[in-house]
Amino acid sequence: MSATCSPVCERAHPAVQMKWSAVQSHIVTGGGELVASTAEGRDFRQEELPHYHLLKRSTRKQFEAWLQDPRCRSDTLCGCWSRPVFAGGWLHDSESMTEAFNLQTPSMLIDMRFPVDRPTEQLRRAGSVEACSDDELMQLAQQHCFAGYSLPSEGDTWAITAMSSEGESRALSS
């Protein structure tokens, strides 16, 4: 590390960045326990895995099928929360390290995670990704954001209920 490297640059060092990302990955998989304790055919099918359609180049086709299925479309937001603690595989992450937000509809999800030490104002001043330095790009690369959707199999039935502001629950879909 050069003597002119700023504190932001120090945090942006790839080893620091990889540590944050590795912790996130470790927590999601329970330190590998998820893979070790599940079996294809018993617990999941290949086509249910997140990157299956990406690898098969069939994502667009599946997304179009999802759009056509009336059970899948809903603009009802049934969950919106921040996560103060994220734990798994004997590791944890808390709101002191990561800002985490989740949005959920009956058939879609969005998960966003940002390291709290990300230099947001510095990145904002850059104005565009093209104007960011390598160190700033490494900071941006730490963000974990993903979205997904559910496409029920033929014959699947499911119900999601939402709580009204008056405390009454109601079915959103079935």
Image (cartoon, helix red, strand yellow):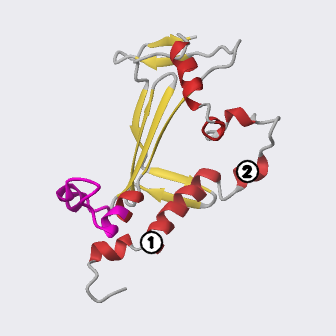
Point out the stretch of residues depicted in magenta.
Answer: 118-137
Query: What percent of the width, then of the height, locates residue 134?
Result: 34, 68
User: Where's the C terminus, which quadrant?
Assistant: top right
* Mark 2 → mark 1, Cα distance in angstroms: 27 Å
User: Where's the N terminus, which quadrant?
Assistant: bottom left
Q: Nearer the viewer, residue 99 or 7?
A: 7
Label 2 Cα crowd, 10 Å radius (few <14 / some 14-19 / many 20+):
few
- Say whether disc 2 or disc 1 marks the residue closer to the N-terminus: 1
Label 1 Cα crowd, 10 Å radius (few <14 / some 14-19 / many 20+):
some
Query: What percent of the width, then of the height, locates residue 27?
Result: 58, 55
In this rendering, is residue 46 above or below 128? above
In this rendering, is residue 123 above or below 37? below
As helix, strand or loop, the secondary structure at mark 1 comes to helix
Q: Which residue is mark 1?
A: 14
Q: Nearer the viewer, residue 83 or 40?
A: 40
At horizontal 50% and vertical 21% (from top left) the residue drawn is 106
Q: Is residue 122 magenta?
A: yes
Amino acid at the residue labelled 2: Val
Q: Is residue 64 left or right of residue 164?
A: right
Query: What percent of the width, then of the height, locates residue 147?
Result: 48, 37
Q: Is residue 128 left or right of residue 81?
A: left
Query: What percent of the width, then of the height, locates residue 54?
Result: 60, 39
The disc at residue 35 is 2
At horizontal 51% and vertical 11% (from top left) the residue drawn is 171
In this rendering, is residue 122 above or below 47? below
Q: Nearer the viewer, residue 80 or 12?
A: 12
Amino acid at the residue labelled 1: Pro
As helix, strand or loop, the secondary structure at mark 2 comes to helix
At horizontal 45% and vertical 19% (from top left) the residue drawn is 162
